[in-house]
Image (spheres, rainbow, N blue to C red):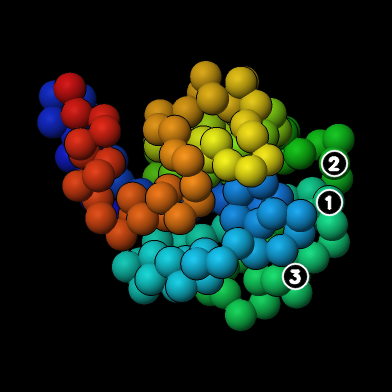
Amino acid sequence: MKISIPGRFDLNIKNLLLDYNGTIALDGKLIKGVEKRLKLIKESGINIFVLTADTHGTVAEECESLPLQIKVFNNGEARFAKRKIAEELDGKLCAAIGNGFNDALMFEESALSIVILGNEGCSPVALRNADIVCKSIEDALDLFLNESRIIATLRG
């Protein structure tokens, strides 16, 4: 996905990094409408990764039918693990979506970062590091299905 942000910069997004709980899932269960959107995003050629400490132990089962890779790590290492994955995937080619404190370093490494202010709330640290704030994961994922919304939000 190549997007030119008038008056600012160009984006070349090849990877979408997603937090799990509080972002695409609530209380360990995938949020309605996420599955359909992720399949459409994958069809557009973007690789999708779910990065999680898997608090509820449900990520594998909930995401088994989705075209994505899951990366699970220890709770205490989450923010560093997420940053490392963004670095390994070349952050300039990554968009990241999350809501928690442990997403802030991943946001710093990614070309585009979107924080979700949903039912679980969001960390003010993640909020400060985000390029875009969305009220729901559905709205955030829809940005990748209608890139003119990203342009409208970020243009100079």
Outermost residue on the front side: it is 119
Q: Which residue is mark 1?
A: 55
Measure the C-alpha gap from mark 2 to mark 1.
Answer: 8 Å
Query: Which amino acid, mark 3?
Result: Ala
Residue 79 at x, y percent in the picture: 71, 33
Of mark 1 and mark 3, the one earlier in the sequence is: 1
Say whether residue 155 is left or right of residue 22.
left
Determine which residue is flagged by label 3. 60
Where residue 87 appears, x then y in whole percent?
56, 38
- SS of the residue at dot 2? helix
Q: CA distance from mark 3 to mark 2?
A: 17 Å
Is residue 72 in sight in this rendering?
Answer: no
Q: What residue lies at 13% left-to-right and 24% top-to-bottom? A: 7
Residue 63 visible here: yes
Q: Is residue 9 above or below residue 139?
A: above
Give the residue at mark 2.
75
Mark 1 touches mark 3? (CB < 8 Å) = no
Whichever of labels 2 and 1 marks the residue nearer the N terminus, that label is 1
Q: Residue at x 39, y 65 (%)?
A: 41
Q: Secondary structure at mark 1?
A: loop
Quadrant (top left/top right/bottom left/bottom right) for the C terminus: top left
